[in-house]
Image (tube, helix red, strand yellow):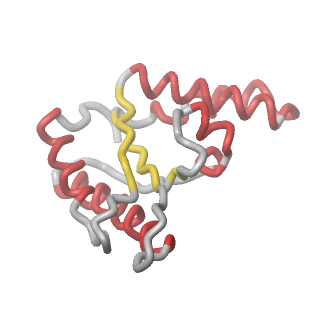
Amino acid sequence: MGDPGPSPAELETILTIGARVPDHGKLTPWRFIVFEGDARVRAGEVIAKVFAQKIRKQRLPKSIVEKRRLTDAPLVIGVVSFTKPHPKVPPWEQELSAGASSMNIVTAATALGYGACWLTGWFAFDRDVLNGLGLKADEKLAG
């Protein structure tokens, strides 16, 4: 998953395919955050800071790993999931739509010849990290 990453046109294709998923009610209960270049480093700094604050016993060596977490690939796409109240579309269907979006992104990138994977980690479930990355209180990181 090294350089080069997708071109702008390929990224647009990947995101378009990521948006073409089952979405009962057309609620679009997800959005994308594209981390490229220095944005990957800044996101890693948020992750490392929270890690160092919460898990002090392994502070330095592990914090360095956490800081570099998003720099292993030239491009990282965060799929943000959220639900909207709807009488016919329960929250779990909306969350499944975000999962389908994540899988479509992996499939699209792979079809274009790139290495791709869908990952989460402790930071995807940590509210302080999510806040630091700009997610709203009702948003989650699907991958």
Q: Which of 76 and 113 is in front in this view?
A: 76
* Residue at horizontal 61 percent and vertical 28 percent from the top: 46
**Outermost left residue:** 9
**Outermost right residue:** 57
**Outermost front residue:** 87
Q: Where is residue 9 in the image (x, y as percent from the top left)?
A: 12, 38
* Residue at horizontal 39 percent and vertical 37 percent from the top: 73
Q: In this view, does 116 lie above or below 35?
A: below
Q: Which of 31 and 69 is in front in this view?
A: 31
* Residue at horizontal 51 percent and vertical 22 percent from the top: 42
**Outermost top residue:** 38
Q: Which of 112 and 135 is in front in this view?
A: 135
Counting the numbered discs, the total is 0
Q: In the image, 137: left or right of 142?
A: right
Q: Where is residue 25 in the image (x, y as percent from the top left)?
A: 31, 71
Q: In the image, 132: left or right of 99?
A: right
Q: In the image, 61: left or right of 100?
A: right
Q: Which of 99 and 56 is in front in this view?
A: 99
Picture quadrant of residue 99: bottom left
Q: Where is residue 143 in the image (x, y as percent from the top left)?
A: 47, 53
* Residue at horizontal 21 percent and vertical 38 percent from the top: 6
Q: Is residue 129 above or below residue 24?
A: above
Which quadrant is the N terminus positioned in? Answer: top left
Picture quadrant of residue 72: top left
